[in-house]
Amino acid sequence: MFLICTVLFLSACGHKRVQVKAPQPTSAPSVSSNELEGTASYYAEPYHGRRTASGEIFDTYKEMTAAHRTLPFNTLVRVTNKTNGREVDVRINDRGPFIDGRVIDLSLRAAREIDMVRAGVAPVKLKVLKQGQAARTVYCVQVGAFENLRAAEVLKQQLEKKYPAVTVQSFAGETTIYRVRIGREPDIQAAQKLAGQLRKDDLKPFVVRVN
């Protein structure tokens, strides 16, 4: 069992994971039901003007875009706010959110369309309208995020005793965050199996699509 201290997640409070049996659209990629229903959040500054995981420049004020952990880049998703029934269609161009129970992170413009800016978060349902294409799919599992590089390296060294392909990746925002990730799996099922193994070590993993 690994003892992990001072893990920093990139939001103030996590929300309880919502386990809902939601039917997948026939055109959707292979994603689990809890990645299609849960809590939405939005992000703006200081990420506005920075590059997203897809390489695009993030424009939170003008673009209808969003971050999702596993859907391919350029996937079109309809997001329904379950509290008021309002809908918005967004394009996936970034990765996240990395908070338990959250399924999508919207641009500010998209969040305004479904009236969730004041609340900050909202329960939502996702529907894949059009799947994006990727030449080769690669998944990894994120197990921690730190402001301190040394803390990330310590976790990496602990994990390497049991798991292969452990890396520390830096992401620049208002502060630099060091994310500890494991594996380069060719399909989501293999990544989810790896995440299941990590949960037995008292970790809180997230499956993340690399491309």
Image: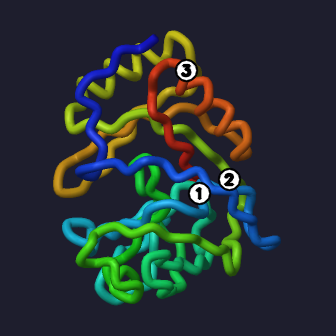
Q: How far is disc 3 from disc 2 in space, using C-alphas?
A: 20 Å
Q: Is residue 61 left or right of residue 55?
A: left
Residue 117 located left or right of residue 103: left
Q: State the SS at label 2.
A: loop
Is residue 120 shown above or below 95? below
108 versus 193 height, above or below: below
Residue 52 image label: none
Q: Position of residue 107 (x, y in %)?
A: 36, 76
**Pointer 3 local density, CA inside 10 Å: few below 14, some 14–19, many at least 20:** few
Q: Quadrant of residue 115?
A: bottom left
Q: Residue at x 36, y 21 (%)?
A: 155
Q: Any mark on residue 32, and which?
A: 2
Helix or strand or loop: what does disc 1 sit on?
A: helix
Q: Which mark is residue 35?
A: 1
Density class for disc 1 (Cα within 10 Å; few <14, some 14-19, many ≥20) is many
The reply, left or right, for residue 133 in relation to residue 112 is right
Q: Quadrant of the C terminus?
A: bottom right
**Residue corresponding to mark 3:** 200
Residue shown at 20%/66% (left/top)?
46
Q: Residue furthest front?
A: 83
Spatial CA distance of label 2 from label 1 is 6 Å
Circle 2 packing at 10 Å, graded few (<14), some (14-19), many (20+), is: some
Q: Which residue sits at x=45%, y=27%?
A: 203
Regarding residue 82, the answer to whether it shows in the image is yes
| Whole-percent x, y for residue 65 in the image | 45, 78
- Amino acid type indicated by mark 3: Lys
Residue type, label 1: Glu
